Image: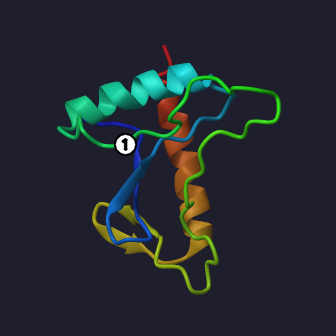
Amino acid sequence: MKLPLIVCRSKSGGAHIFLFTSDYVSAKLMRDKLVQIKAVLGYGGSEVFPKQTELKSKDDTGNFLNLPYFNYKNSVRYAFKKMVKLLHWMIFLIYIQDTIWILTCYRN
């Protein structure tokens, strides 16, 4: 199964799986796709972000997630590609661009 996902080490040592898009995607569509993907992968009980599909008010920001490479010089949150650690954040950005192109095949 070829899915356009990027696996990153979380701050606690677990994993976060990211799905990047080249265009705006509604929170509902993103959440629905991620819920489907986590079930297919066998992680039905895992958290999915965004947690909500709409904001409660114009001042609401929704939930936050620690992104990979935050404080990159000292970060323990990095991406994997085929179980090889991607050490440099610039390689991660290139990898995102490659993955976004694949994602366009799955949009509809």
Residue at the outermost left position: 42
**Depicted 7 relative to depicted 19: above or below:** below
Is the residue 75 above or below the residue 67 in the image?
below
Q: Residue at x 41, y 65 (%)?
A: 10
SS class of the residue under badge 1?
A: loop
Q: Position of residue 30 (x, y in %)?
A: 51, 27
Vertical order, 14 against 42 (above or below) = below
Q: Say which residue label 1 marks.
A: 47
Using residue 81 as the reference point, say whether residue 51 is left or right of it. right
* Residue 79: x %, y % from top left: 44, 65
In the image: residue 88, left or right of residue 17: right
Residue 72: give x, y in percent of width and height: 61, 78
Q: Residue at x 35, y 28 (%)?
A: 35
Q: Quadrant of the N terminus?
A: top left
- The residue positioned 69% from the left and 26% from the top of the image is 56
**Which residue is nearer to you in this view: 95 or 61?**
61
Which residue lies at the image location 29% right of the left edge and 35% below the top edge? Answer: 38
Observer-nearest of 80 and 52: 52
| Residue toward you, 56 or 78 | 56
* Residue furthest out toward the top: 108
Q: Position of residue 7 (x, y in %)?
A: 38, 56
